[in-house]
Image (tube, rainbow, N blue to C red):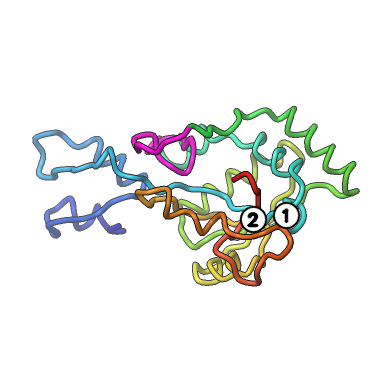
Amino acid sequence: RLQSFEATGMDGAVDLASVDEPRQLARLDDLPDDGPVTVHEDRNGERPKVAIAFETGRPPFDHITARRAVALATDRQAILEKVLDGEGTISRGIISDASPWFSDHSSPARDVGRSKEQAEEYAEETGQDIEFTMLVPPDPTIAHVASMWRLQLAEAGIDVHLEPVDQDVLDASVAYGQYQAALVVGFADPHPGLYEPLLRGIPAGPPLVSSNYTRHVNPIV
């Protein structure tokens, strides 16, 4: 990424730049075909994805009702359009659509009513409302995603506290399982076999440090 692309790339001060910030991508889309900048895009490449990790070994996400409530309160289309300027697509799984290993795992459409039902069920199970803290890395676009997502969940009565942290702190927190939720960017590997470390573990003894940072263990998976 070249943060100052407008100041250096458009006027020819650089020969090559890799750009992934939505506002900059939108400006490139508006350039004339015969202009001074040539844009190359690998539409078959595996694209990084914005995702939210839950630590399923601790409240509230040790209950599937909390995970369902959060998923049903999320409006992915609104985030794509309002935060990312429509640059990108809504992911249907950790493998992109263009991959030969793609398998459709689309998330549910937003349904605030059903989200509230799941939140009420969680409260009945635990005696607590759904409330959690989410770690947010120091990236303005990702921070904007976090802020908008927080407002969406508030409509379903779910309270999210945003905690900005440096990337190294976030990485250590998820590795040690010392978090409730974390906003991450990843899943850009070209082969699904490289995601195997995310699934490691046994229900009886999750290790102190784990590559399975959600601590979700399912024998079938």
Secondary element type, mark 1: strand
Identify residue type, mark 2: Ala
User: In the image, 27: left or right of 51?
Assistant: left
Q: Which mark is residue 132?
A: 1
User: In the image, 183: left or right of 134?
Assistant: left
- Which badge, 2 or 1, comes first in the chain's sequence? 1
Distance CA(mark 2)–CA(mark 1): 7 Å
What residue do we see at 18% from left, 54% from top? 9
Residue 113 belongs to magenta span: no
Q: Quadrant of the N terminus?
A: bottom left
Provide residue 57's location: percent of width, then percent of height.
Answer: 72, 58
What residue do we see at 53% from left, 34% from top? 105
User: In the image, 92: left or right of 67?
Assistant: left
Do the numbered discs 2 and 1 sit on residues whose CB atoms are within 8 Å?
yes
Q: Nearer the viewer, residue 59 or 26?
A: 59
Q: Nearer the viewer, residue 33 or 198?
A: 198
Identify residue type, mark 1: Phe
Provide residue 118's location: percent of width, then percent of height.
Answer: 78, 36
What residue do we see at 35% from left, 36% from top? 100
Q: Quadrant of the C terminus?
A: top right
Provide residue 87's location: percent of width, then percent of height.
Answer: 37, 38
Q: Nearer the viewer, residue 201 or 98?
A: 201
Residue 47, image quadrant: top left
Residue 92 belongs to magenta span: yes
Q: Which mark is residue 181?
A: 2
Secondary element type, mark 2: strand
- Magenta extent: 86-103
Provide residue 190's location: percent of width, then percent of height.
Answer: 35, 49
